[in-house]
Amino acid sequence: METITRDDEQQHLMVDVDVIEARSKFRVRELTRDSETGVSILSRVCLDIPKGLIVGIIGPSGSGKSTLLRSLNRLWEPPAGTVFLDGRDICDLDVLSLRRKVGMLFQLPVLFEGTVADNVRYGPHLRGEKLTDTEVHKLLNLADLDSSFASKTGGALSVGQAQRVALARTLANEPEVLLLDEPTSALDPISTQNIEDAILKLKKSQGMTTIIVSHSIKQIQRIADLVCLLVNGEVVEVLKPEHLSEANHPMAQKFLELSS
């Protein structure tokens, strides 16, 4: 068994190694953040994110889910010695290089001016590289869009299509990790399924490590390999999706009951 322990409070979070035999991509240790008024947002969070798996982060609103996610690519700057990528403290890494490795997709897609192809080429262009049409089409296909979308503009797209273009744009940076913050909350069921299919395709084809924040228990059960339950800024459960009903924390039980 792999165990994450807070000895002083005698709390133990345990996950079967047979589920996560790959080494950890991220290690989070004693990550804490308070608001400007002194309210705890994250409280000594300890968590391992296994390489190549999809990890869901769920919990009530205000539990610190987005803050935890943003700490992983320094959109919120974590304290030194608390977040490690492949064993290296992310505070020691160049922030732009880190964000290319750890791409993020937000709740509402924002596309730049120009065509879909222009958007997909944006990241490589900043590095002095130019993607060929074939490379753009391949990235669109990874995001579950066909090549005909390359010449379209943002105004011609649905929200779901724009979200998949934003995903393709993120993938153009060749990230090792995807951070997804409620990426389907504004989408219809069909668009939601398209995004989920794209996430699963990336795991299967590229071994992509994905961390997704979602309020949808059913979505997490559909796509996640592992679920982290965050309540009041604390990791209270780490479970397989099929074992969510076995959560022990009272707040976790209530949240799961109302969400299911």
Image (tube, rainbow, N blue to C red):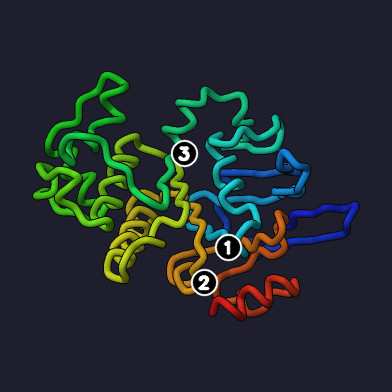
The residue labelled by disc 2 is: 217
Label 3 crowd bin: few (<14), some (14–19), many (20+), radius 10 Å: many
> In front of the other: label 3 or label 2?
2
Task: Identify the residue at the far front of this view.
Answer: 37
Mark before the other along the chain sequence, 1 or 3:
1
Q: Between label 1 and label 3, give the one nearer the viewer.
A: 1
What residue occupies the far top of the structure in this picture? Answer: 128
Disc 1: which residue? 58
Question: From where the camera sits, is residue 125 visible?
Answer: yes
x and y percentages locating residue 45 in the rendered image: 72, 49
Mark 1 vs 2: CB contact within 8 A = yes
Residues at marks 3 and 2 touching, judged by CB atoms closer than 8 Å: no
Percent across and percent down for residue 172 are 29, 37
Q: For this view, does 42 lie left or right of residue 162?
A: right
Q: Amino acid at mark 1?
A: Ile
Question: Mark number for residue 66?
Answer: none
